[in-house]
Amino acid sequence: MEIIDSILLGIIQGLTEFLPVSSSGHLELGKAILGDDSVPEESLLFTVVLHFATALSTMVIFRKDIYDILKGLFAFKWNEDTQFVAKIALSMLPAAIIGFTYESEFAEMFGGNIKLVGFMLIVTALLLYLADKAKNTDKKVSFTNALVIGFAQAIAMLPGISRSGATISTSVLLGNDKTKAARFSFLMVVPLIFGKIAKDILSGELTYDNSNFTSLTVGFIAAFISGLIACTWMISLVKKSKLVYFSIYCLIVGLIAIYYASIN
């Protein structure tokens, strides 16, 4: 793999993990426009490395939160931190069950369906617009909210639905504080990423070649740095009610995708 390709893929992974534009939807559009052969599938090891980089960037941004949560958790009391961990665990259930059980079926059913991608991008645009216009509150995520947000994350497996966009928007529309909604959205995905990494490692399909060390390293660094930037930027955008720009972008791309699917 070329060094430039590794850097670009790392940057794309870091940005799309946090920005509400649906990386899966854009990948399907790229395959349709350029042709499947023009968007090569990267090695499973490279994918695992990039996912680890973005998970690590999340942990760095929320390092104080994670430290406080772990400190409270190991107090072995039903305190606010223990409840937060329980909410994260609850939110993971829908995506974990559906994702780990039907991941391949989802890929077969919805892969290459450009019209679906277009409509789902429009749904993402609507969610972002509604969340952007919602009034800010100081409400914390409840257990019921956590489960609903978890289902939003599961639905985001559809290409064109942004994971961060769906979870943050759902949380805000449920009346939660925007900053707390972004915090919960980003922290809830970390265990899922590590779970996916563990699944890939245990699959026995990972192969390592010494010649790929440089590509893996620069890809990791690019994904980590772009992830830090995107995560920080996204938190600021949610807090300042600036999601409307991403809403407009998703709407335009969605309409283009539907038009493209109609003429081909």
Image (spheres, rainbow, N blue to C red):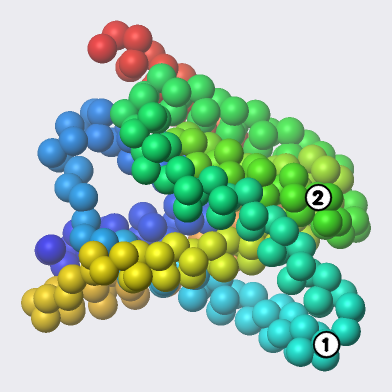
Number of numbered discs present? 2
The residue where tag 2 is placed is: 145
Identify whether 127 is placed above or below 260.
below
Residue 62 occupies quadrant:
bottom right
Tell which residue pokes out farthest to the top in this image: 263
Q: Position of 243 compared to 261: left or right?
A: right
Q: Residue at x 56, y 67 (%)?
A: 190
The kind of residue on which mark 1 rests is Phe
Q: Is residue 243 visible?
A: no
Q: Residue at x 37, y 43 (%)?
A: 104
Q: Where does the image place residue 172, in percent across and percent down from the top left? A: 78, 46
Identify whether 10 is placed above or below 109.
below
Mark 1, residues whose alpha carbon is within 10 Å: few (<14), some, or many (≥20)? few
Tell which residue pokes out farthest to the left in this image: 211
Q: Earlier in the sequence, mark 1 or mark 2?
A: 1
Quadrant that contains the N terminus: bottom left
Quadrant that contains the C terminus: top left
Q: Where does the image place residue 83, in percent across and percent down from the top left? A: 83, 70
Q: Residue at x 25, y 28 (%)?
A: 32
Mark 2 residue element: helix
Residue 4 occupies quadrant:
bottom left
The kind of residue on which mark 2 rests is Asn
Q: Where does the image place residue 203, in percent across and percent down from the top left? A: 31, 65
Q: Nearer the viewer, mark 1 or mark 2?
A: 1
The residue where tag 1 is placed is: 76
Mark 1 residue element: loop
Q: Position of 178 compared to 125: left or right?
A: right
Q: Where does the image place residue 150, in percent across and percent down from the top left? A: 67, 50
Kindly report the distance in space between the C-alpha atoms of the residues bearing marks 1 and 2: 24 Å
Q: Residue at x 48, y 69 (%)?
A: 194
